[in-house]
Every structure is written in structure tokens, then in C-alpha cells.
Image: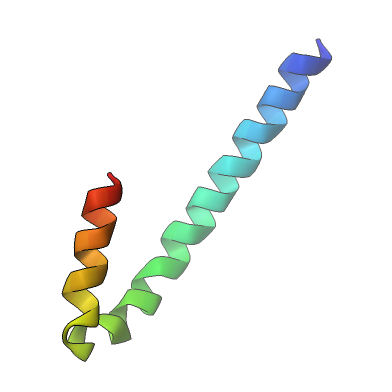
Amino acid sequence: MSTYRLLGILFIVTGVFLGVAALLTPPWLGPVKPMGPAGPSFQNGAQRLK
């Protein structure tokens, strides 16, 4: 039972982390995109990671 509880806690923590990251990403990407080469290269790197 404890392993299932650990998996549940891990799942919840990762979900919260992903939610916070999704909330924080748009304002952080806003100033980066107009900066020229940094925007496209960052997007290419993100697509390569997928």
C-alpha cells in the first residue's frame, strides 16, 4: 500500500509542478521572443526535446 501512496504523491507533485511551469512560462517567453535569434533557437530546442 505504501508504494501506491508514494506513486500518488509523486503524481500529484509532478502535476502541480507542471501546472506552475505552464503558468510561469508565457510571461517568461513574452520578452524572449522579440529578442531575435534567442526566440527561434529556443523554440527549435523545445521542439527537438519533444
Q: 43 and 17: which one is in front?
A: 43
Residue 17 sits above or below residue 11 on the image: below
Which residue appears at 26% of the width and 60% of the height? 45
Residue toward you, 36 or 1:
36
Q: Position of residue 38 (x, y in %)?
A: 24, 80
Q: Residue at x 22, y 64 (%)?
A: 43
Work out which residue is located at the far right of the displayed protein and give it: 2
How many numbered markers are drawn?
Answer: 0
The quarter of the image holding the C terminus is top left
Compared to residue 16, the image places residue 45 above or below, namely: below
In the displayed structure, 12 sits above or below 30; it is above
In the image, what residue occupies the spot 67% across and 26% down?
A: 8
Give the color scheme: rainbow, by chain, secondary structure or one colour.
Answer: rainbow
Task: Name the side, left or right, on which 19 lies relative to 14.
Answer: left
* Residue closest to the eye, 38 or 23: 38
Residue 18 drawn at (x, y percent):
50, 50
Quarter of the image with the N terminus in it: top right
Residue positioned 49% across, 52% down in the render: 19
Quarter of the view holding residue 15 = top right
| Residue 31 in picture, x, y percent from top left | 30, 86
Image height of 21 relative to 31, above or below: above
The answer to which image quadrant residue 46 occupies is bottom left
Q: Position of residue 32 (x, y in %)?
A: 29, 83
Q: Nearer the viewer, residue 39 or 31?
A: 39
